[in-house]
Amino acid sequence: MILGAGFSGTLTAIHLLRAVGGSPVPGRKSPFRIALVDSSGAFGPGVAYGRGAGEGLLNVGAGSMGAFPEAPGDFLGWLGGREDAGGNQAALATAFLPRRLYGEYLEDLLRREREAHPDILETVTGRALDLVPMPDGTYSVFLNQGRYLYAQKVVLALGNFSPPPPVFGGEGGYQGDPRYLGQPWRPNTIERLSEPGDVLILGSGLTCLDFLAALAKRKTRGRIHVLSRRGLFPIAHPPVSIPSKNEGPIPAGTLREIVRAVRRKIAGGAFWRDVIDSLRPQTQALWQGLSLEDRRRFVRHLRPYWETVRHRAPAEVLALKDRLEGEGKLVCHRGRLSYIEPTEEGLEVVFQRRGTGEAVRLLVGYVVNGTGLAADCLRTGDALVRSLLDRGLARPDALHFGLETDAEGRLRPARGEPRHGIFAIGSLRRGTLWETTAVRELRQQAAELAVRLREEEAGEIAPGRLPFDI
């Protein structure tokens, strides 16, 4: 059973279907079955590439966005059969295309595999609230509609949790106010921000740029304010005319040693983009080799700067941001949020300006939290995660970014080593792997996890017994 049908869950299901092949005996159903569960009822695009993506663009060229590790150009090939894609293959390979188009690609991949294996995959609309180990070694998963599913293996592909509300002194009454938009990827978020009046976006990362791209076309009255502590926006991708070069690996070591090695390469004439991109194949290993104190030091001091150079944006999106700012439609602030107070006129926001400590007051119609991924799995409010922790089936990683897993992605229980069949993929493994939210890493995880599940399942399914039942 796969809980979550965004990129990670969908790709895991597709790889499993491809591994299963046809029925073992003509006219007989395969004993292997997959339940793909998602609360949205949309299977494939997930939040990142679905209706909530708005006007957002992919932040990687289409030529590298294939869903399969062995075929990174698969998305590009799929585009070749569409009349609305536009451009030739060479131009499309480096183009930053709409994320919703990528969602259609994922939906199409899943549809084709489902048609090829109609007796194996079942999609289920629902939200998993609880997971209970059964005496026979299977798992009972309780859904929000009051239904139970049973499975021998469970994959948690829960995606990215919404960022937690800001914490500061006061009662926090703003959190229940409909003008505070705490789930930034909901389909109606852009519609509400487009209403007349000023609005405030918390955070200046890729989510913020997605908002700006959509609001530039829709918002006609009122200013857009952006507040972040350092005022750092993602750096633009260099022009394709600048060829990339592999600058080789960095020796493992302490955080200080790694930073010095990066600086030496750049000081020696290497282009910063090439140095950062050359780190990518070894980022997970470097992260895992750091002490806990070094990991904390990285998160506290270097993370904001890493994210601006690692998670870059299309140059045209940043040009749009600069244009809005030049026209007075966008105001960017650097500072620390002091409080948000609901009033009859709107939400009163007060922050301390960075550098001077001056208190600045804004009155806005909406505040949207675009600060990025949830930084503490204990504050997500997700019922299933809470259930896993309460039952001792999982434990937070040391930084509380997600749930601790072993090298195979199996959840580590509260005590001892993993002995169960509950796996995680994607952002839940962020504390363990760090780089685990982009297509390149996720497609590899999905492929490896599918192989592991298939190997384990082959020895466990008795003839005629289904791995899950409804």
Image (cartoon, rainbow, N blue to C red):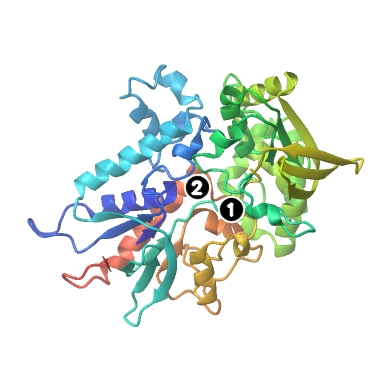
Kind of residue indicated by mark 1: Gln
Instruction: Look at discs 1 and 2 and give the one toward the viewer.
Output: 2
Please tell me which residue lies in front, 432 or 400: 400
Q: What residue does disc 2 label?
A: 441
Q: Residue 244 location, x and y as percent? A: 59, 28
Residue 354 seen in the figure: no
Kind of residue indicated by mark 2: Glu
Residue 186 seen in the figure: yes
Question: For numbered disc 2, what is the local secondary structure?
Answer: helix
Q: Residue 369 location, x and y as percent? A: 65, 45
Image point (58%, 51%), residue name: 162
Please tell me which residue lies in front, 192 or 403: 192
Q: Residues within 10 Å of mark 1 (few under 14, many from 20)?
A: some
Please identify the residue farthest to the left as the structure is shown.
27
- Residues under numbered marks 1 and 2 in contact, where contact means CB atoms less than 8 Å apart: yes
Q: What residue does disc 1 label?
A: 284
